[in-house]
Image: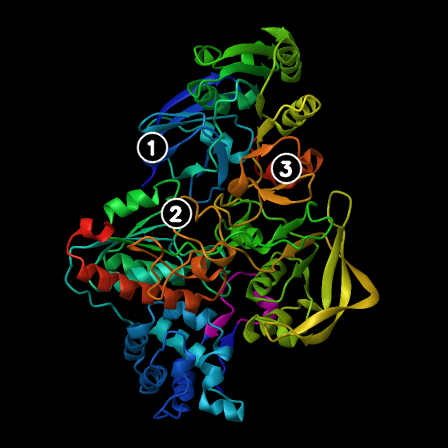
Amino acid sequence: MTFPIVEKETLNEGTVLLRVKAPRIAAHAQAGQFVVLRIREKGERIPLTLADWDEETITLVFQPVGKTTQDLAKMLPGGSIRDVLGPLGNPAEISKVGTVVLVGGGLGIAPLFPQARAFKEAGNRVVCVIGVRTKGLLFWEDRFKGYAELVVCTEDGSHGMKGLVTDGLKRVMRERKVDRVVAIGPPVMMKFVSLATREAMIPTVVSINSIMVDGIGMCGGCRVPLTTKEIRFSCADGPEFDGHIVDWDALLVRNRMYEDEEKACRCT
Amino acid sequence: MHVTRTQDPKERISNFSEVDLGYADTDAIAEAKRCLQCTNPTCVPGCPVGIDIPGFIRRIAAGDPDGALAVLKETNYLPGTCGRVCPQEDQCEKACILQAKKDPINIGKLEKYAADMGKHSFVKKPPIGRKVAVVGSGPAGLTCASFLAMHGVAVTVLEALHEPGGVLRYGIPEFRMPNAIVEREVEQLTRLGVVFEMNVLVGRTVTLDELRAEYDAVFIGSGAGLPYFLNVPGEEKTGVLTANEFLTRINLMHGYRFPEYDTPIKRAEHAVVIGGGNVAMDAARAARRLGSQVTVAYRRTEAEMPARIEEIRHAKEEGIGFELLAAPIEIIGDTKVSGISCQRMALGDPDASGRRRPVPVEGETFTLPCDQVVIAIGQGCNPVLLKGCDAELGKGGTVAVDRTFMTSIPGVYAGGDAVSGSSTVIMAMHDGREAAKAILARLKNHHSRIANYK
């Protein structure tokens, strides 16, 4: 059984959306979860966070930056993905906490969407701070409407407020009481979001997409270094962690572990 | 003892093909003829699944590998696997009467010979109109599925990874347990009508409740899980990984053929493997084949190593160094590993396992320079695979079962490492078969599926 691609959309020059038929995954998916996929027999297994789902299909949003995502970006409706395993990871902890600020940078905007929907449905006031380098890289701005108040940040000021998502977050924090922050994006972004909320002692959840092989609690490759010196695993204990106790510098080093090999097989 | 042929060590360290080349017919027959055919064989009780050892050896001696395989398959559905990975020296061969002369029958290699050379197909009983889901396709699951399918049960095996075989696929390397053997054992099950579904993680892709609604019984053989770490400073450095990750990249993902295959694997200059079990030997020998200089560091002596004697011998032949009585205390380097500091140990009094406990030798520490550390010191239960399974857990977080291998949920059985925590392939097979017997008895006693669960 393979997983047919039913829809492909180019969200912008660097971001691709695929809708894939996977009824069993779709039926059990919850906000915060991910899948591990392999596109061909000689392919690697890579994790991707779910951006959305309906009864029959799951939505994946990715940037073609590595070997597998580049190959994936070339696939078309009618084709199919060889293996998709999921939904994996613990679902996001969704409850009524008051005002929730969801911070998404770049590709992180996509997996933020199911969280916005879930937090809204749980009765929260939801603010989404989403950020990209420049207007052309933005996607799904209208999709959040009805679920969240939107603060758009661009680094070059071409749309919304000029600045990084941390600037947007700080503005929201000045204007109102924030009860929880959820950040999804590049590790550097999540690091600075966590630093920004630390002093104000706002509980901050980050979603960590680390190096992973099986995704089912076997290989120990996805370990997340914590400042408490405990070892946790993204696939078994995560993917969401308390941003205030992640050892960001150690994590950043770990994520570059296979940099040389990745370069070797990337088609440029 | 007639020994089997092996690939030359100089040659085999540059390939991943099977090291042991098995018996030629004449040698197998000669070895089989050494068997005394005891009236009360001591080897049989030495086997966890009670194989009729003199029976299959007698047929090899008579030049009948097909007959030998048929005898093996009465009790052991995966002889090609057991012949390769069982710790025979602690089981059947230890109990062999010729052990008195320090020259036991080479039972493991004879089993492998029969499995590889013999032809056999299972005889299937008529369908009994019952369905069972088997969770996990490792040794426990495959054995359970075999037994049930032969007895006319419709079996579906659900596997989370993209290939069947469990530890036989992701854990044990090609040079010791070729994938072709796993494929053959799986193929045989497919011919019995067993359906394999890949990419299904029970508890996530389907829930246990959904399985219980659809099937008459469920067997959980989900295996072990997260590897242990050393808990020493520096473990987060680049170049430190577990044997599970290292071997999964190599065996399941074919990382040793990167970039033909997409999964990368680090080829170290000098790898240090921590541990003394079969997994440590597998990792060390795999690293050797990737071109690394390899040192195995173990905190006791060779006599206490849990690895099979053959694996230790093969590792030595392949030029792997052993640093014994060495316990890691710190992994050094900036962000990348550059060495591992160890404490020199000495053997003290025996511990609970009966092995002499290693104790530190005051003031004696040393550093092994290396650019890779592979940790192979065992593993705990798997929190992911057991999630969403509401069965009661026992000590150490494994699934608790009764004498019939049934969990706290009626109709849901479990066995193998999911129950034991960490054991051998043959013990997992034993569990799978015993659970299958209990499942079959239950299915025959319960006439309605509703009655099963009320």
Residue B77 screen position, x and y as percent? 33, 68
Relative to residue B409, is residue B264 drawn left or right? right
Q: Amino acid at mark 2?
A: Cys
Q: Amino acid at mark 3?
A: Asn
Q: Tell us which disc is closer to us: 3 or 2.
A: 2
Quadrant location of the C terminus of chain A? top right
Q: Identify the residue position indicated by label 3 in the image.
A: A255
Residue B431 screen position, x and y as percent? 37, 65
Name the one closer to the observer, B95 or A115.
Answer: A115
Q: Identify the residue position indicated by label 2 in the image.
A: B389
Q: Tell us which disc is closer to us: 3 or 1.
A: 1
Q: Which quadrant holds residue A260?
A: top right
Chain at tag 1:
A
Is residue B13 shown in magenta? yes
Q: Are marks 3 and 1 in contact (CB under 8 Å)?
A: no
Label ID, residue A27: 1
Is residue A240 shown in magenta? no
Q: Amino acid at mark 1?
A: Ala
Which residues, given as a range, are shown in magenta? B7-21
Residue B211 screen position, x and y as percent? 29, 46
Secondary structure predominantly adopted by residues drawn in magenta: loop
- SS class, disc 3: helix
Residue drawn 39% across and 56% down? B221
Relative to residue A26, is residue B191 drawn left or right? left
Q: Relative to A33, does residue B381 appear above or below in the rendering?
A: below
What color scheme is it?
rainbow
